[in-house]
Image: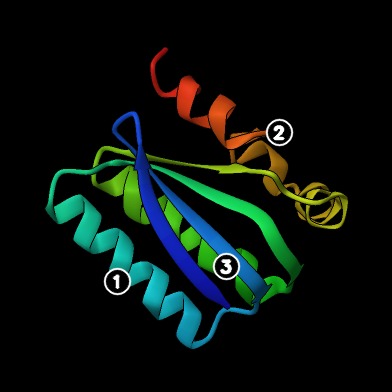
Amino acid sequence: MKSKSKEVDGVTVIELKGNVMGGPDASTLNDQLHKLTESGKKKVVIDLKEVNFMNSSGLGMLIGGLTTMKNAGGDLKIANASEKIESLLMITKLITVFEHFDTVKNAVKSFKK
């Protein structure tokens, strides 16, 4: 998995690419989120547009990220999940845990409400 981040209207957008399988990637994302919260950035959107596959460890990684942001008084939302990943979220009932948006633009806008 590769990731790259950018800032859009005060929201950090983290683009994930490839297969999200947890493991070392989970540590990388977790470190990145902790650095963001330490610098006062507490609004994050995870862009899943370029993610081909996600396993249960990858889901755990997202849950860990959400927990990190919530504990810091922030939030983490997801955008652009493929049909396959969206059905994974539905099967695991995590669709009720994450705020999910069709586009990064809509996810970023949702922080303004």
Does label 1 or label 2 sit earlier along the sequence? 1
Distance between the Cα atoms at labels 1 and 3? 15 Å
Proximity of marks 1 and 2: CB atoms separated by less than 8 Å: no
Q: Which residue is mark 2?
A: 102
Q: Amino acid at mark 2?
A: Asp
Outermost residue, bottom direction?
Answer: 24
Q: Which mark is residue 60?
A: 3
Observer-side mark, 1 or 2, equals 2
Q: Give the image location of residue 113, x and y in percent.
A: 42, 12
Measuring 23% from the left and 54% from the top, which residue is drawn there? 36
Distance between the Cα atoms at labels 2 and 3? 21 Å
Relative to residue 51, is residue 38 depicted above or below?
A: above
Which element type, helix, strand or loop, lies under badge 1?
Answer: helix
Which quarter of the figure has residue 79?
A: top right
Q: Nearer the viewer, residue 108 or 26?
A: 108
Relative to residue 78, is residue 56 depicted above or below?
A: below
Measuring 39% from the left and 79% from the top, which residue is drawn there? 27
Q: Which residue is mark 1?
A: 31
